[in-house]
Image: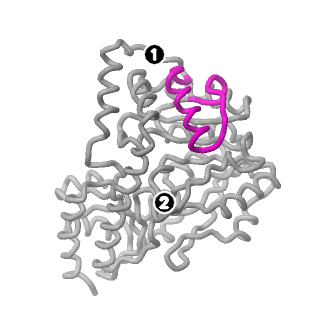
Amino acid sequence: MTRVNNRYNAVNLAQGFPDFDPPKEIVQSAKQALDEGFHQYAITWGSPSIRKAIAGKFAWFNGVEVDPERHVTVVCGGTEAMMAAMLAVVDPGDEVIVFEPFYENYGPDALLAGGTPVFVPLRQHGGEMRFDFDELRRAFSKKTKAIVVNTPHNPTGKVFSLEEMKAIANLCIEHDVLALTDEPYEHIIFDGEKHVTMAALPGMARRTVTTNSASKTYSVTGWRVGWAIALDDSIATAIRRVHDFLSIGAAAPLQEAVAKAIYMPLSYYGELARGYQARRDAMVSILDDAGFEYATPKGAYYVMCRYPACGYDDDLAFSHFLSEEVGVTPVPGRAFYHDPELAKPYVRFAFPKKLETLERVSERMRRLHEFRK
């Protein structure tokens, strides 16, 4: 969709990357690391400085003590972190539960690891996205190896509540299942919601692999520095072995820069959330005016919505139309569903953009009224 966007010189709300610069401090740290000679391989599972910083933050923010020497593996972005975790724990014939709609890599990750994804739907109830507990319970079987939990959630912006996380944890304990959690938006959270880390819940510390990255928190999606945390030594070792064959190691100077970024003052994380809430509010106001239907995102920087009636009943066709005729590019819903038929009414917009960019989006989306049925 970015290629489509560029063809029509539209505003790109498809890919989830900021159109503003990262904090000056992190850029300066990267320059300093280059000047200080960090040009060769770091330890394959991450330099000591970044692993220490990650472990420290996992303690003070997420509430879980980990050993940076044994439990933390630094990889090339959160995407590799989840793939490495899948390859480390999923065997042929295993099932992996995935909430749907889902970040588009989870299903293929399970398949590449030899497993079978089992999808549990998130449905809109009023202004919220929820799963049905009985449906989730039925998804667990003797074949279930793991469940993927992404909170805050891409593409819907759902923040899983403490009650929901406890319900998932209880099923994992009951069925001896691992939780693979994806938490890159943990600081991008709105309306007083709280981020819950699965590994911090009773009985889940050694049963959870937590994946994360620097991409979203520090606005450096192109740096590709992520990590996986596993308190079970055998799982942590397996992840390191897989990572060694996937990419060997993340960029050494950027690891040093991210290590320093993790020590940013607490005020930074509050300002980050407030800035994104202002963008969220601007985006949903645009969608309201244009006639889209959605569940209000409580975190992350996406909104999944039903598009208005304007002559299209296919998500891909509508996305191309919106890019070409209106000048705003979304992602068609089929990127997030295993069944394209389920995806037909939906598109996703990403809003990690300057407020002036969103004002341009607002101006262009007014054109949509010309096509409304």
The residue indicated by pointer 1 is 41
Residue 85 higher or lower than 292, as above or below? above
Q: Earlier in the sequence, mark 2 or mark 1?
A: 1
Q: Which residue is at a point 73% across and 43% down the rendered structure image?
A: 207
Task: Please state, as top left, top right, bottom left or bottom right, where the N terminus lies in the image.
Answer: bottom left
Horizontal arrangement in the rendering, residue 373 relative to residue 47 (left or right)? left
Q: Which residue is at a point 46% across and 26% down the rendered structure image?
A: 250
User: Are circles 2 and 1 on residues that touch, CB within 8 Å?
Assistant: no
The residue indicated by pointer 2 is 336
Q: Which residue is at a point 74% across and 30% down the rendered structure image?
A: 234
Question: Crowding near pointer 2: few (<14 within 10 Å), some, many (20+)?
Answer: many
Q: Which residue is at a point 40% across and 57% down the rendered structure image?
A: 301
Q: Position of residue 16 (x, y in %)?
A: 36, 51
Query: In the image, which residues are magenta?
Result: 45-73
**Mark 2: which amino acid?**
Phe
**Mark 1: which amino acid?**
Tyr
